[in-house]
Image (spheres, grey):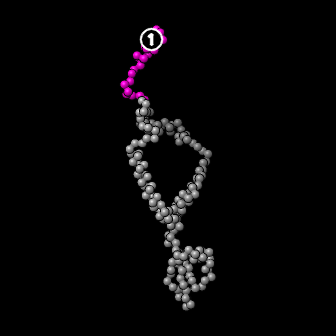
Amino acid sequence: MTDEAIINESEKSTPKTDGRGGARPGAGRKPGGMNEATMLRLKKEEEIKKVIYNYSERLIGTQIKQALGGSYLFKQSIDEDGGKSKPVIVDDPEEIVGFLSGQYDDKKDILYHYIFTAKPNTAAIENLLDRGFGRPKQGVELDGNLNVNPYGDFSEEELLRRISELTDGTGK
């Protein structure tokens, strides 16, 4: 048989496909293509992110308040007879700074009260710091004993008994 005859013979034995089965050019999902459920989920995630973004300042402010806890600075005036006025909340930042720096410690006619109404929330503090400065690396302690065989301490008898229990004695 000539080379040409062999090639013609091999072409006859190769089954012709009529476009079905096997890899076809242009078939299948395109790279990066998504099904409808994935596209709907991503669209909904984007909508949620937009809503959260619109409230982000209030949410961060609320988290900061939780982190700091509820605290107020009150002041009372003291008259010459020693009587005290009704407590008033101090909302002037300069006066608050003055109180915290000890500027008013020697005043005899004003009495200050610093009151906490709620404990600071350490989880909120940690969350804010992680978001603001990045989460710190977490250390992991290893004792050097990396026994990956949980049955390493069993005797041969114990292993055979357990295998028998798990397989109902059939070994399968």
Q: Position of residue 11 (x, y in %)?
A: 42, 17
Q: Residue furthest top?
A: 1
Considering only vertical position in the picture, is 10 above or below 170?
A: above
The image quadrant of residue 27 is top left
Is residue 170 something that shows in the picture?
no
Q: Which residues are magenta?
A: 1-23
- Could you tell me if residue 157 is visible in this image? yes
Residue at image coords 43%, 52%: 46
* Residue at 58% from the left image edge and 75% from the top image edge: 94
Q: Amino acid at mark 1?
A: Ala
In the depicted view, which residue is nearer to us: 3 or 147? 3
Q: Tag count in the figure?
A: 1
> In what element is the residue under mark 1?
helix
Q: In this orientation, which residue lies closer to the viewer: 67 or 62?
A: 62
Q: Is residue 106 found left or right of 119 in the rendered image?
A: right
Q: Quadrant of the C terminus?
A: top left
Work out whether residue 145 or residue 3 is closer to the camera in this orientation and state it.
3
The residue at the point 57 percent across, 77 percent down is 95
Q: Is residue 172 magenta?
A: no
Q: Position of residue 64 (x, y in %)?
A: 51, 65
Residue assigned mark 1: 5
Residue 43 lies, with reference to residue 67, above or below; the image says: above
* Residue 158 coordinates in the image, percent (x, y): 50, 39
Residue shown at 56% from the left, 82% from the top: 111
